[in-house]
Image (cartoon, grey):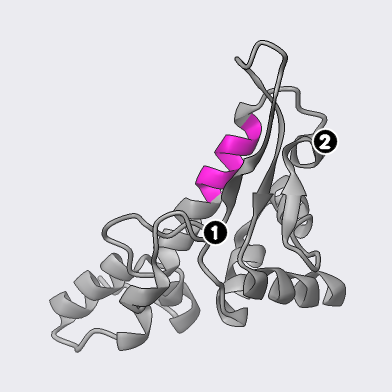
Amino acid sequence: MQIVLEPGDFGRLSASTQRELLGLLGAAPRAAAAAPESELRWRAPYALSREQAERLVASLPGKAQRRLALFATPTGRVKMQDLMAVDDSRDLRSTSRFVRDMATRLRRMVDDPEKKAQLIQWDFDATRWDKSKQTIVDGVYYVAPETAAILRELFDEG
């Protein structure tokens, strides 16, 4: 039996899977898969490289691509209601699922054993509550300025 992994396919594997396969084959792990310690911080969005952003956008289904495209602004900030409007959702959990999915996809691209890497963060100071202070009515999600700039380039090209 023969298993063939093209370089592009190998690049889509998580960093830990890449290391495991290289270890089984007796090859040295690729240093590029690891994210520098300083890049991964709690409550700070990860700044994507152009290559990472291209891989991420290419891997997304239509709705997720449209949601991510909303961050392609000079500020990289998007209201929760605008994210929900992509598919006319009234469920606040739809944005949470999207943010969680983006974090999962990002963590597969970078070595993040502590699960610190987040592509999208919530601006707690911009949270708007209902009158009873029980339910969030709106708020703001944001990405790193570098990520917003790269997304502008990518979505303007497409």
Q: Is residue 92 visible?
A: yes
Magenta span covers which residues? 94-101
* SS assignment at label 1: loop
Q: Position of residue 135 (x, y in %)?
A: 64, 18
Q: Which mark is residue 15?
A: none
Say which residue label 2 marks: 85
Hey, which quadrant is residue 137 in on the image? Answer: top right
Q: Position of residue 113 (x, y in %)?
A: 26, 60
> Magenta includes 100?
yes
**Quarter of the image with the N terminus in it:** bottom left
Say which residue label 1 marks: 119
Q: Nearer the viewer, residue 15 or 148?
A: 148
Under mark 2, the amino acid is Ala
> Magenta includes 124?
no
Would you say the magenta stretch is mainly helix, strand or loop? helix
**Quarter of the image with the C terminus in it:** bottom right
* SS assignment at label 2: helix
Q: Residue furthest top?
A: 132
Please tell me how crowded label 2 is: few (under 14), some (14-19), or many (20+) other residues with Cα within 10 Å: few
Cα distance in 3D space between marks 2 and 1: 20 Å
Under mark 1, the amino acid is Leu
Q: Position of residue 95 (x, y in %)?
A: 64, 37
Q: Earlier in the sequence, mark 2 or mark 1?
A: 2
Q: Residue 149, relative to residue 75: is it above or below?
A: below
Q: Position of residue 2 (x, y in %)?
A: 29, 74
Task: Say whether residue 35 is left or right of residue 43.
Answer: left
Task: Say whether residue 8 is left or right of residue 5.
Answer: right
Residue at image position (77%, 59%) is 69
Residue at image position (75%, 50%) is 78
